[in-house]
Image (cartoon, grey):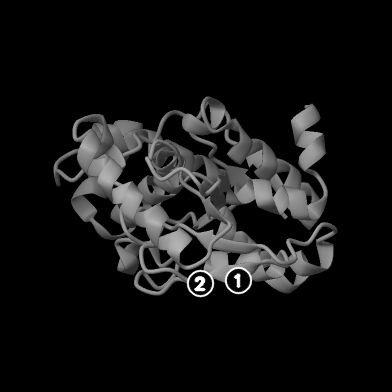
Amino acid sequence: MTYSYFPGCTLKNNAKDLDHYARECAKVLGFELEEIENWQCCGAVYPQASDEIATKLSSVRALADAKEKGQDLITVCSACHHVLKRVNDDMKNVEDIRTRANNYMKLDTPYEGETEVLHFLEVLRDRVGFDKVKEKVVNPFKGKKIGAYYGCLLLRPGKILQFDDPENPKIMEDLIRALGGEPVIYPYRNECCGGYISLKEKEMSQNMCDKILESAEGFGADMLITACPLCMYNLKKSTVNGTPIYYFTELLAEALGVKEEVTEA
């Protein structure tokens, strides 16, 4: 199975590991990530203004490219997934945005939200299946207590993203079990890390991150995994620095036995 792949800017710069491990793991698990040619930044933040069109066009272009190839579109970055999924919903359900975007794009065939947008984790759960992932594991995380940190962007707004239960998600915990680890359920796993306010309100963001890490440590987590580069950045700057934090793709690559190949590359 081949998917159109939208890596996004951060995965080409500060979060290269998130991207590289995802590509190698996809090969082991039997699907291909075909990077969209000439993709452009999704904007990283979904524009809230109802009349904002220009900043959505790069997402529409990527979605239309996937439609033309007859492929579903995969993202790994939480922010990219959030923006692409919400823009796709606009193109499907908001006539004014759909009309104006198509007028700008001048596509041969108007785009109307036909592409299915999937996060890499959704592909593991719904297309590959965690049972198959478990079968491929060669280096299980036996005895490791691993906390999943979801943050905001993967889960909310739940009616549009439809990724998991926003209040009680379990997709990453199910992945942890498939990798042989013990998932740690802690109260702050779906609370905000501060996001972009970390640039302006550093102390506020730091306090939010401290609470997340203190919560995870208090419930016995040996480490945390996340899918969000911004969350990774904020959590690593926290003053509570006893818990290591990894991208979920890194643990997946280690469990599947391909981490060294990525490191050597």
Residue of label 1: 174
Q: Quadrant of the C terminus?
A: top right
Residue of label 2: 170
35, 196: nearer the viewer: 196
Cβ–Cβ under 8 Å for marks 2 and 1? yes
The residue under label 2 is which amino acid type?
A: Lys
Q: Secondary structure at mark 2?
A: loop
| Place of residue 70 in the rendered image (x, y in percent of width and height, measured from the top left) | 60, 51
Q: Quadrant of the N terminus?
A: bottom right
In the image, taking residue 55 as reference, residue 4 lies left or right, namely: right
The single residue placed furthest to the right in the displayed view is 138
Residue 84 against residue 122 in the figure, above or below: above
- At x 70%, y 69%, the residue is 178
Q: Which mark is residue 22?
A: none
| Place of residue 44 in the rendered image (x, y in percent of width and height, measured from the top left) | 35, 37
| Place of residue 101 in the rendered image (x, y in percent of width and height, measured from the top left) | 28, 40
In the image, taking residue 84 as reference, residue 123 lies left or right, namely: right
